[in-house]
Structure formats: C-alpha cells, structure tokens
Amino acid sequence: MRQQFVIVQALGGKPLKRVVMTNADKGVLVADPGLLDEIGSGIHRPVTAPRESVFNFDEDVFDELLVQWHESKQTSAATWAKLDHFQPMLDSVD
C-alpha cells in the first residue's frame, strides 16, 4: 500500500503534513510521517482529523502555507482554497 500524504489544517490554521492511516466515518485517521515507527511500536498514536480539515497534498501550496505560518502564525483562507478536500487514493488493480 502506498502512503498518501495530506495537509491537515490544525488549530489557528497551522498546516501539517500527515500520512493517511485510515479513512473512517468519524474523520480521517492521520499520523506524522516522522513518527510511523513509534506508532507501530505503540509509543505514539495517530489522530482523527475532521474531514473538513483534511486536504489532498500539494507541495507548492503546502510550502506557501508554511511560509505564511512562519511569518505571522496565521494562514490565508485564499491559499487553503487552492486545495481540494481529501479524496482517498484508489489502489490500482493490474
């Protein structure tokens, strides 16, 4: 299974790069990609993010959001509007 990265809009608009663990009815279970080994060993746990706060990953938009966040600890709604809400990848069947 390929990892699917997303951007999660955290409190205050902070952009977070996360990997999708599971897409569930209550939200999207996501994890910090740097903590996958610790999650596997039970040290850390993934979190459930509300669907409206999870967006398909776009490197350029993510970088733009990070610059905004680092400069002023806020992000622009217009920049977030460039992103599509999360859509799960479908594994291809050969």
Image (tube, grey):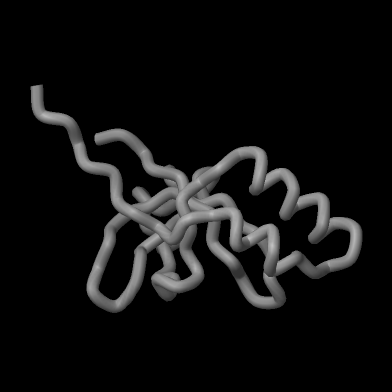
Quadrant assignment, res 79: bottom right
* Residue at x 60% of width, y 54% of height: 82
Please name whichever residue, 42 or 1, is drawn nearer the observer in this view of the structure.
1
Please name whichever residue, 45 or 62, is drawn nearer the observer in this view of the structure.
62
* Residue at x 31% of width, y 34% of height: 2
Placement of 33 over or under 27, stated as above or below = above
> What is the residue that sits farthest to the left in this orientation?
94
Residue 41: image location, x then y, percent: 36, 50
Quadrant assignment, res 31: bottom left
> What is the residue that sits farthest to the right in this orientation?
71
Left/right placement of residue 46 relative to residue 67 reads: left
* Residue at x 35% of width, y 65% of height: 28
Placement of 5 over or under 7, stated as above or below = above
Q: Quadrant of the C terminus?
A: top left
> What is the residue that sits farthest to the top in this orientation?
94
Placement of 3 over or under 53, stated as above or below = above
Left/right placement of residue 43 relative to residue 91 reads: right
Residue 51: image location, x then y, percent: 40, 71
